[in-house]
Each structure stands twice: as C-alpha cells, then as structure tokens.
Amino acid sequence: MKQMRLAAMAAATILTTTTFAHATVITQQSFDADPTLSDTQAPGSWYVDRYAPAGFSSQDFMGDHRLAHEITASDGADNRPSSFSSVFYNTQGRKYDTAGANRISIDLFFDAAFETGGRLGGFWGTAFDAADAITAYPIIDYFGTGTGQDAGFRYWDGAAFVFAGTPSGFAWEAFNTLTIELDRAAEQFEYLVNGEVIGTIGANGATRIGNAILQNYNSQAGTDRTLYWDNFSAEVTAPIPLPATLPMLLAGLGLAGVVARRKRG
C-alpha cells in the first residue's frame, strides 16, 4: 500500500514540473518551386552568404521536388577572382531570415560518397541577443575522411569544431534531419540529427535565431557537387505548463486506488 502511495506522489511531482511545447511556425518550405533569390538581404528571400553558389533551385530528385544547391570547380579558390580567393569564400551558400525563431530544421540527403570526401558543408544559424547583437553562430557541418579526420558530424562551439560522429539513426543514401534549437530556459543551443542530440553549447545571451544558412563547401582546386535539401522550417517554441490541479488530481486518484484495495481486502 505504501509503495502505491509513494508512486502516486512521485507521479504528481514529475507532472508538476513537466511542460508540453507549443510551436508557432515562421516558415515552412518544401521547395516545390524555385525559391526567391537575392544578392542582398531581403524579406522572404534566400540571399547570398559569403559567395554565391552556382545553383540554388528546385529540381526533381528521388521522386519529389528538392532544393538543389550546386557548387562547381570553376568557383574553387584557385579559379575565383583574387578578391575572393580566401578560404573564407569556400563556403558558398544562401541565408534566410527567420525573425524570432528558436528552432530551425531541414532535411539533407547524404550520398554514401560523402563519407570519404572532404568537408561537405552544412546547416548554420546566426543568433542574436535582446539588443540585436550577434552572439553566436550555431553550426552543424559534416566532414569526410578526405579531410584527414574521422568522418562524421561536427558542431561549432564558438571557438572550434567539435567532433560528434554519426548518431545511431543516421542513414546513407537517405535524407537526414538537421536541427538547431535554442533552449531559452536552459540557456543553451542543442544540435540534433534525426531528433538525437549530438551536442550542446551555451547560448551566450542569445534570445533568437535570426537567420538560417545553407552551405556547400568548395575547395582550393574546385569541386563539382550538388546537395539536396528539403523541408526547411523555422519555429518559435514555447513551453505550456500543465494545469496546476492536474498533478493533485492524479495523486488523489492514486490514493483512491489504495483505499479501494484496502476495502476489497
């Protein structure tokens, strides 16, 4: 009897501190049509980050429309104009403003050849504080063995990339979901692959993720590669506490069960 009562009280205590998450969608994009592009920042547009990729358009791939993000050897460091020859411009992508989001997510197709390739590129964000100052660049990238390192995901901790390997749910020749989430209550960023946390870093005062960036990484000599993205979303999530009376009700039900057992005995 005592054990049942303790269990009921424990359940009530847990539920008192449990919350559900409610999400408000800022944008959802399935890339069934070409996205709106811009060379400079513009609302509702994918605008250039660092260096414009060779292609950024909707294409048929594996039976559906996807975002084809293309880089070419002609845009490698050796072939770019001298003012863009720095490795900084090897990251060739576009960004999209996400207003007050605290979670951004997208699917990326992983060709098995990526495992032995170089640095692939990845999913980036720019985080801002309440004064609109940039406080962090949350990043999930993938590096192949062609970099001279172990193949796997790496996330940015604010100073360097941290090796995270590949989670158990990861699959080659398939789309995998990359997510960056700012947990405001815990004051940290979470990096997730297919819903599995691969790393966390401090939020550094961030209150929102102001934009999302898709990057395809070129090389010194130049690389021809297409990344296929799909199902981009940016959301604002907020915890919804359970009604204060619910844990008390459940505890009462548990105790009622104890009394009923005693009567039957």
Image: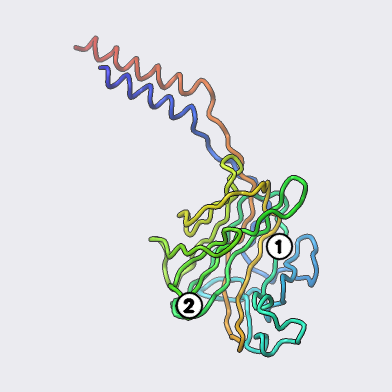
Label 2 element class: helix
Query: Residue 114, which numbered label?
Result: 2
Residue under the point 66% across and 85% down = 77
Residue under the point 47% across and 58% down = 194
- Pinpoint residue 82: horizontal percent, then vertical percent: 75, 86
Residue lying farthest left? 265
Q: Nearer the viewer, mark 1 or mark 2?
A: 2
Q: Nearer the viewer, residue 261 or 198?
A: 198
* Amino acid type at mark 1: Tyr
Q: Nearer the viewer, residue 183 or 252?
A: 183
Q: In the displayed structure, does residue 2 sit left or right of residue 112?
A: left
Mark 2 crowd level (few <14, some 14–19, many ≥20, 10 Å Cα): some
* Residue indicated by mark 1: 96
Label 1 element class: strand
In space, the residues marked 1 and 2 are separated at their CA atoms by 25 Å
* Amino acid type at mark 2: Phe
